[in-house]
Image (cartoon, coloured by chain):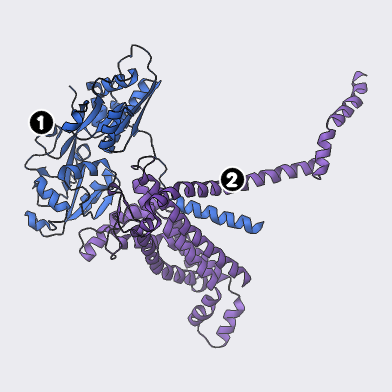
Amino acid sequence: MKKIIATMMALAMAVSLAACGGNGGQQSQAPSTQNPGTQAPSTAEPAAELSGTVLCVGSTSMEDVMKTLAEQFGIDNQGVTVNVEGGGSGAGVEGALNGTADIGLASRALKDEEKSQGLVETELALDGIAVIVNPANGVSDLTVEQIAQIYTGEITNWSELGGSDGEIALIGRESGSGTRDGFESITGTEDLCQYDEELTSTGSVIESVRNNPNAIGYASLSATEGDDTIKTLTVGGVAPSEATVLDGTYEIQRPFMLITKEGAELSAQAQAFFDWITSPAANDLIAGAGAVPVAE
Amino acid sequence: MTDLSSLPQQEKKPEERTSMMTKFKNRFGLHTARDVVEFIVHAIFFLCGFVAVACVLFISIYLIISGIPAIGKIGVVEFLFGDTWQPSQELYGILPFILTSLAGTAGAILIGVPIGVLTAMFLAKVANNKVAAVIRSAVSLLAGIPSVVYGLVGMMVLVPAIRELFNLPSGASLLAAIVVLAIMILPSIINVAETSLRAVPKEYEEASLALGATHIETIFRVSLPAARSGVATAIVLGIGRAIGEAMAIIMVSGNVANMPGSLFTPVRFLTTAIASEMNYATVGSVWRDALFSIGLVLFLFIMLINVILNVFIKNKKED
């Protein structure tokens, strides 16, 4: 009996050691808004009490924004649960097309053949990604092409770009991250990047670039604005800001699209959710989650 | 009067009613109130013990059930010996993670064990009481530092230092992870090794000194060999700690799924592979299942280490 107990204890210890590695939150709750003090005004008083669920499926890049919106909508409408699932823009288009999702999420514009199948896109927000370097770095402007060459390993030294001699350290995000997906798809470097560090949060990327004079990294626009300890590069001569993202002159950006099917009627709760997130009332929440809202 | 007459009746009634209860009590040898209390407390102890067992069983079964399907889909050889991990391309080879975990643990042991064992020798045999007390409390403080703090300090101090020292683009590397792990395993190695060194019978050492050996010779040639199973236990404990660590090394290792080609390669461990991607993997996808399979592989590694540990402990007892 003693032996059995001892073995069990050893097992328990083993498990507790292993457990350090686990990260339980699978369908973790929507991240709370970054500034709860300035939460968007509540949804307009619904005419009738809404209930049921709304399923949004698609782009993982949009998950942060959508979960923030879903959380607020759930608070304002107690009977409604909005579920946000990832799977990629392709899954969002697919879900909207065959009706398995109420609203599809795509972080790109629809292709013509997708539109011809009766799908409709509604722009929810724009996603701008800032490219950052250490303040000590002499380089302050790069083209999208140069950025792609840096990340694919064609350019490996800052001196090739007019900076001081130093091997470039490529800082990025882990696979699955929406920011990485956005950056790589805009610069055309999917699965080609030769990262030196794949960090698990925007904060670590900024921290790493701040500490390394030869580093280059990328982070969502909202996280880098007003941070003097890092240098945000201009891309093709255009500095990233909400204004340059909105007017389209800043190149490293992409749209967040809501995909629905023409003619297919949304359920009452899905329609209410759709109307609210595309109204100016949701702008603060969208901005809080790191995207540039487009509703006026 | 009424009270008196009703008293015997009341006494008798419960007896009749509880005849079943009495049978039950007799059957389990519970004759007195004390026995009943004993029985209840035993039951509580048993339940508490059962919680741990139930948790272990549940986790083992859960890991096996959720880890096996992906291995089946990907194929055992492709999964364990595939050298590319790229979920977007449906490539799920975890050899880089396995080799990194092995290399990282081996490196940590190579650095941590000599320091730890020498510290233990110093504490047990050389240092005077005051010095030993200071070192001992420093060691227990080291054990109490949360792993995320190790990671943070490593990220802010160690990674830039490695970058400067070796003139690299980025200091986040296998080397940084090894150094952090080596420091993290020190407390468990020192504690266990010191205890076993102290347990060496005094007569052994006195005999050695009497034969003309110096103090240091005695420590290395008599005390250490006599305490070898304890030292081995310390090493295995260190391995267990190092292979299961995630938080500290995710911040300093670079977290890129490379083969551990050199000490300066940014790498990803078994633990950090799970930690960094579990948030993104869609429920029901092969990707997610593959992460559980990594957990299963890690679990098997740790089971193996515990089996080895038990063998050492058993040998020690037989000694």
Which quarter of the figure has residue B115?
bottom left
Chain for disc number 1 = A
* Rendered location of residue B132, percent (x, y): 49, 66
Question: Viewed as shown, does residue B118 lie left or right of B199?
Answer: left
What shade does chain B have? purple
Question: Viewed as shown, does residue B24 lie left or right of A16?
Answer: right
Chain for disc number 2 = B
Q: Is residue B133 visible?
A: no
Q: Is residue A16 visible?
A: yes
Question: Viewed as shown, does residue B25 lie left or right of B200?
Answer: right
As displayed, is residue B217 above or below residue B274? below
Q: Which residue is mark 2?
A: B51
Q: Furthest residue to the bottom?
A: B212
Q: In 3D space, how far apart are the residues under numbered discs 2 and 1 (Cα atoms)?
A: 61 Å
- Which amino acid lies under the numbered mark 2 shown in the image of this protein? Val
- Tell me, for residue A5, which label it has, or none: none
What shade does chain A have? blue
